[in-house]
């Protein structure tokens, strides 16, 4: 009996020890990876080129009419982006330039670009729950965590920039959210030479990047606007690489060695981009990928990715679809099919880490470096608050429109009247100012010839920082 009791007691002790051990294990908190604190740690998909904005606006009025918040017949709309897992989509504002009276029409090119910027703002305003305009890395991180698409504005063809006002106009574009710009399309312009090596009227060009183009490159570096080298001829490309202090991107190009086409990059160009820390974004357009366009598939896209990876490393290749700007491979016909590209990369032997680099992390690295601390500055306590009496994209009467804003100080610091400026399309106006009402205004003496325009109101407090607000407006005709 005593022996049985001892056996029972021993068994009970063992059970007690096991129970406590198991209880202890259950109470250990689950180990989870801490959330990434920087956007580059997120596995985001980034596409650096599309022409969808052109399809949003009316061909005649240039006003936005098609809401891509719903399914469309386009390569890109918000439902397709979400189905395809695209987190960051660059929306290109494209113009090939205009000629009038035998010379470049800078005003019309500017109006065209602004109409496309306006279409982007209109799209975001109509779909605030699923897309947002990103002007900083913080924006991209916030939008990604909210499950929204980040829209990034870019310019394809800076045909609106002229020597007298171009730098100020570029700053206004930056104010509006432009974060990447190609200096040229295929035609040459005031900044440099396109791949055609000729101006829009057919006159041959020479000399690569112009002196004014160098000033624009310097200002883009200062502002934090990524330089897009796609569409440049070789002379302009090499001048840009010599001039720029920041990494560059080829937003939608291929490897020349695989497809002999002037829009593609030769090996030494690819090496130069990589040595500068940049990225070559492989295009999906069949004409740039193979001589026989009908044979192009996702595998052809991967061929170009693989070639660039073998040449300079996986850290310097990304994707730039050219959706809504060109024909697409049958098995990669719109943004919803992007996961097929990831699957093709996996079949080709790329691991998850490298696929994440190709699909977005490489591009995010360049964005982070070039954009820097881009975003809306909070200013100081003496920076005036500027409240324009004009909404983004608003239509104004065609007869001598008045542009005005209310300027006020938040801490009683007097406004520095000498600092007051109203800038319209890169041109500076000295405005009227009422100290009693705080209203600053300018009446345009003549009805503007073109439809779309950009205005910036600037003011500073005495001894304080300069504040500014920028708006797009159009003339109602």
Image: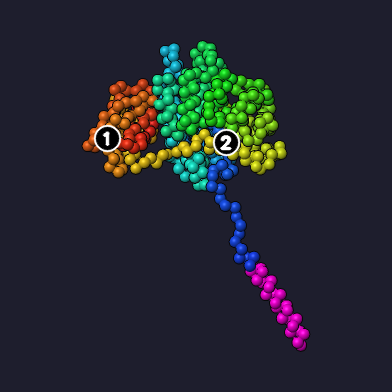
- Name the residue nearer the viewer: 131 or 179: 179
Residue at image point 55% right, 23% down: 242
Residue linked to disc 1? 439
Q: Quadrant of the C terminus?
A: top left
Left or right for 78, reference 3: left
* Residue at the far front in the pictured view: 463
Residue at the image point whose x is 62% and y is 33% from the top: 316
**What's the magenta bit mostly, secondary-structure-wise?**
helix
Q: Does the magenta portion include 42?
A: no
Q: Are marks 1 and 2 in contact (CB under 8 Å)?
A: no
| 448 up-or-down from 369: above or below | above
| Quadrant housing residue 31 | bottom right
Q: Residues within 10 Å of mark 1 (few under 14, many from 20)?
A: some
Dot 2: what SS?
A: helix
Name the disc covering residue 395, or none. Answer: none
Furthest toward the bottom, the residue is 1
The residue shown at (42%, 20%) is 163
Residue extending farthest to the left is 436
User: Which label sits on residue 363?
Assistant: 2
In the picture, the quarter occupied by the N terminus is bottom right
Residue 45 image position (x, y, % from top left): 58, 39
Viewer-closest of 324 and 142:
142
| Residue numbers of the magenta segment | 1-23
In the rendered image, residue 7 lying in the magenta stretch gets the answer yes
418 or 62, which lies in front? 418
Residue 83 in sight here: no
The percent position of residue 16, horizontal first and vertical second, equals 67, 75
């Amino acid at each position: 009996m005593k022996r049985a009791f001892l056996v029972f007691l021993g068994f009970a002790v063992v059970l007690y020890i096991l129970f406590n051990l198991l209880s202890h294990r259950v109470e250990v908190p689950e180990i989870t990876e801490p959330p990434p604190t920087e956007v580059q740690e997120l596995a985001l998909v980034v596409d650096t080129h599309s022409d969808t904005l052109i399809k949003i606006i009316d061909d005649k009025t240039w006003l936005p009419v098609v809401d891509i918040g719903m399914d469309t017949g386009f390569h890109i709309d918000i439902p397709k982006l979400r189905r395809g897992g695209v987190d960051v989509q660059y929306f290109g504002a494209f113009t090939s330039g205009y000629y009038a009276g035998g010379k470049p029409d800078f005003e019309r090119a500017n109006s065209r670009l602004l109409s496309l910027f306006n279409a982007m703002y209109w799209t975001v305003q109509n779909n605030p729950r699923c897309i947002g305009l990103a002007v900083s890395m913080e924006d991209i991180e916030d939008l990604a965590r909210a499950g929204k698409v980040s829209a990034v504005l870019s310019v394809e063809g800076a045909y609106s920039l002229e020597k007298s006002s171009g730098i100020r106009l570029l700053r206004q574009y930056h104010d509006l959210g432009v974060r990447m710009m190609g200096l040229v399309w295929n035609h040459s312009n005031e900044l440099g030479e396109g791949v055609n090596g000729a101006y829009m009227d057919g006159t041959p060009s020479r000399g690569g990047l112009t002196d004014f183009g160098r000033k624009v490159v310097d200002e883009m570096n200062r502002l934090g606007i990524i330089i897009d080298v796609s569409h440049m001829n070789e002379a302009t490309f090499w001048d840009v690489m010599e001039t720029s202090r920041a990494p560059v991107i080829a937003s939608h190009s291929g490897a020349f060695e695989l497809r002999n086409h002037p829009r593609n990059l030769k090996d030494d160009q690819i090496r130069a981009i990589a040595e500068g820390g940049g990225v070559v974004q492989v295009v999906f357009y069949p004409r740039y990928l193979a001589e026989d366009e009908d044979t192009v598939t996702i595998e052809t896209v991967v061929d170009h990715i693989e070639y660039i990876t073998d040449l300079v490393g996986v850290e310097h290749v990304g994707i730039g679809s050219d959706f809504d700007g060109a024909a697409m491979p049958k098995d990669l016909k719109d943004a919803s099919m992007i996961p097929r590209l990831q699957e093709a990369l996996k079949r080709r032997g790329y691991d998850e880490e490298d696929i994440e680099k190709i699909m977005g992390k490489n591009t995010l690295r360049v964005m982070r470096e070039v954009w820097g601390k881009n975003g809306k500055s909070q200013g100081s306590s003496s920076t005036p608050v500027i409240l324009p009496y004009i909404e983004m994209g608003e239509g104004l009467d065609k007869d001598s429109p008045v542009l005005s804003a209310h300027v006020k100080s938040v801490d009683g610091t007097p406004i520095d009247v000498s600092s007051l400026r109203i800038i319209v399309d890169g041109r500076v106006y000295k405005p009227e100012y009422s100290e009693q009402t705080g209203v600053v205004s300018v009446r345009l003496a003549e009805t503007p010839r073109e439809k779309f325009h950009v205005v910036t109101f600037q003011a500073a407090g005495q001894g304080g920082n300069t504040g500014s607000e920028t708006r797009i407006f159009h003339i109602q005709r």
